[in-house]
Amino acid sequence: MSEQRTALREFLTLGEAAEILRLSRATIWRRIRDGDLEACYFGQRSCRIPKAALDDYIAGSMRASRPGGGNGD
């Protein structure tokens, strides 16, 4: 696979991100609006989520939900 095609796969549509997280597209939009999830805009109507940003969001959500603050106590 070429480097250019690989780079394109580093961005997800809102639908793809919603499917991965098993959330609605509206919830994904709210997370973006609230600043919880990073998004990139290409033009006025094209919004994509960097895969790394989704990975960070998932990791942050997992840490926040651990009993005892996630510090192993």
Image (cartoon, grey):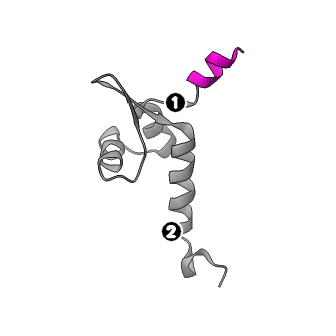
Q: Give the x, y percent position of residue 9.
A: 58, 25
Compared to residue 59, the image places residue 3 above or below, namely: above
The residue depicted at 36 percent of the width and 43 percent of the height is: 28
Upstream in sequence: badge 1 or badge 2: 1
Q: Which is the main secondary structure of the residues drawn in magenta?
A: helix
Q: Which residues are magenta?
A: 1-9
Q: Quadrant of residue 52?
A: top right
Disc 1 secondary structure class: strand
Q: Is residue 19 left or right of residue 45?
A: right
Rounded to the nearest angstrom, the CA distance separating label 1 from label 2 is 25 Å
Q: Amino acid at mark 2?
A: Ala
Residue 3 sits inside the magenta stretch? yes
The residue depicted at 42 percent of the width and 48 percent of the height is: 37
In the image, which disc is placed on residue 34?
none
Q: Amino acid at mark 1?
A: Phe
Q: Quadrant of residue 68?
A: bottom right
